[in-house]
């Protein structure tokens, strides 16, 4: 198969992922997607991308498997403490002081491997709610992540905060890891679901609080806007929406939410008085494709999945001796960048991210390289991902603030500079 046809099939697969789960390929990188596709293709014994694309169109199970391969949950207990601190404060000062009793409903979506909804449950109990006074729904597209969440057994990697005293109270150390107490585990109802295809009905549950953190950064603009509309619909009047730091820009421009003045909570309150009579419109399901050939795609500036012919003489001598020592890839990438070989450095970073997708350092370096090329939107995505993976990465925050200033968004830049100042104290 020639390179152009192979690239067309690769882009067609990215299109299917965007249609089905809203994934913006640039948010994780085309090389990461290509690596996941190759793993699935080889496991199925298929010879090329055309065969895999044909199989993917006719097999919904395989689309789920590919989704599992590209979605890597990265979370831990009480990640970014302030959202949970504000939730506890909100319960004590507003909800528990209400003159009537009701059930407090919370949605955690996506919930990944369960650390976030279980952190919410602990917060509610410590704020004074009985287990019969709240319901927590936890939604994720990944069956593997949900299976781990239901087991509720975690390793040291799930406890990364400075204060893990809660672990001694709510977990028991077992040979398999830290087992969450049954009293907490049974308060969360896990289910598989796609934020873009929720099957809304007249009996849809509404929520007092929704945690939807660090997923919008992976969506394309259309999926992001419609998801925000959907979350607004699901919230009760004056309900709270918690998002990730990198996603506040998408919410702050929406007139249907007002920000909560609590540092680092990244919380917004629904401003409308009632839910609309009809749910908002959502992305349609992926279209049925009757041909076994990829659709004609417009020319794009996106890099080819394979190595560019001009980069091969630079990259092949580097990749061969270090293919079993991935950490050195980033060192070589920085050296290439210093020598002015930006495209080669970018290619090495993307190679590294195929095997180390949760590396904040690699995303940060990739952001610097794209920024040096003048690709500010791509650089912004990389810096936001680096901050998502490491909220204390000061250099990425500085770069992001400078980009916002260059784009004329001084309000957003000021918020980021304030966060930088807090880290420096």
Image (cartoon, rainbow, N blue to C red):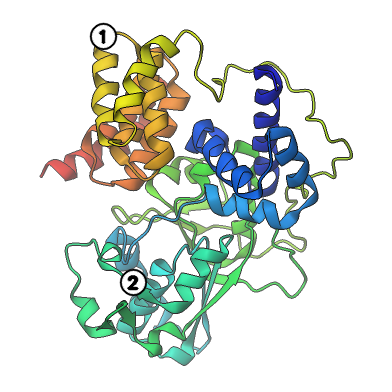
Query: Dot 1: within a 10 Å radius of its alpha carbon, few (fewer than 14), some, or many (20 or more) residues?
Result: few
Q: Tell me the residue that label 2 is attached to.
A: 154
Q: What element carries label 1?
A: loop
Depth check, front residue: 190 or 226:
190
CA distance separating discs 1 and 2: 44 Å
Query: Where does residue 172 sit, x and y in percent of width and height?
Result: 26, 84
Residue furthest to the right: 290
Judge left or right: residue 297 versus residue 73.
right
Query: Where does residue 415 sit, x and y in percent of width and height?
Result: 31, 39
Please name the residue shown 40% across and 67% down the image: 116
Query: Dot 2: within a 10 Å radius of its alpha carbon, few (fewer than 14), some, or many (20 or more) residues?
Result: many
Judge left or right: residue 17 versus residue 287.
left
Query: Where does residue 168 sit, x and y in percent of width and height?
Result: 20, 81
Of callouts 1 and 2, the N-terminal one = 2
Task: Please identify the quarter of the rendering in which residue 345 is found.
Answer: top left
Q: How many labels does the image show?
A: 2
Q: Tell me the residue that label 1 is attached to.
A: 339
């Amino acid at each position: 198969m020639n390179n152009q046809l192979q690239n067309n099939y690769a882009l067609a697969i990215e299109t299917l992922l965007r249609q089905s789960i809203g994934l913006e390929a640039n948010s994780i990188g085309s090389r990461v997607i290509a690596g996941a596709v190759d793993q699935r293709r080889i496991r199925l014994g298929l010879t090329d991308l055309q065969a895999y694309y044909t199989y993917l169109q006719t097999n919904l199970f395989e689309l789920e498997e590919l989704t599992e391969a590209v979605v890597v949950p990265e979370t831990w207990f009480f990640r970014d403490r302030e959202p949970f601190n504000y939730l506890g404060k909100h319960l004590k000062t507003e909800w528990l002081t209400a003159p009537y009793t009701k059930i407090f409903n919370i949605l955690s979506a996506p919930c990944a491997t369960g650390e976030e909804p279980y952190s919410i449950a602990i917060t509610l109990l410590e704020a004074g709610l009985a287990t019969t006074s709240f319901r927590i729904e936890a939604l994720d597209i990944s069956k593997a992540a949900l299976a781990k969440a239901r087991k509720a057994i975690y390793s040291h990697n799930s406890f990364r905060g400075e204060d893990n005293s809660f672990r001694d109270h709510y977990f028991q150390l077992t040979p398999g890891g830290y087992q969450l107490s049954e009293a907490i585990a049974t308060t969360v109802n896990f289910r598989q679901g796609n934020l873009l295809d929720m099957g809304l009905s007249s009996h849809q549950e509404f929520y007092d609080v929704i945690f939807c953190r660090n997923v919008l950064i992976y969506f394309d603009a259309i999926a992001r806007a419609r998801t925000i509309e959907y979350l607004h619909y699901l919230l009760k009047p004056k309900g709270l929406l918690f998002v990730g730091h990198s996603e506040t820009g998408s919410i702050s421009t929406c007139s249907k939410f007002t920000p909560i003045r609590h540092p680092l909570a990244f919380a917004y309150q629904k401003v409308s008085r009632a839910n609309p009579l009809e749910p908002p419109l959502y992305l349609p399901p992926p279209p049925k494709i009757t041909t076994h050939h990829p659709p004609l795609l417009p020319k794009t500036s996106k890099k080819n999945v394979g190595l560019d012919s001009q980069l091969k003489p630079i990259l092949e001598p580097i990749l061969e001796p270090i293919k079993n020592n991935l950490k050195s890839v980033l060192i070589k990438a920085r050296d290439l960048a210093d020598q002015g070989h930006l495209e080669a450095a970018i290619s090495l970073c993307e190679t590294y991210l195929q095997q180390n997708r949760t590396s904040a350092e690699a995303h940060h370096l990739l952001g610097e390289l794209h920024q040096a090329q003048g690709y500010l939107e791509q650089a912004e995505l990389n810096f936001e991902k680096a901050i998502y993976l490491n909220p204390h990465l000061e250099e990425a925050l500085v770069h992001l603030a400078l980009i916002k200033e260059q784009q004329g968004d001084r309000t957003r830049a000021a918020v980021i500079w304030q966060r930088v100042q807090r880290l420096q104290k």
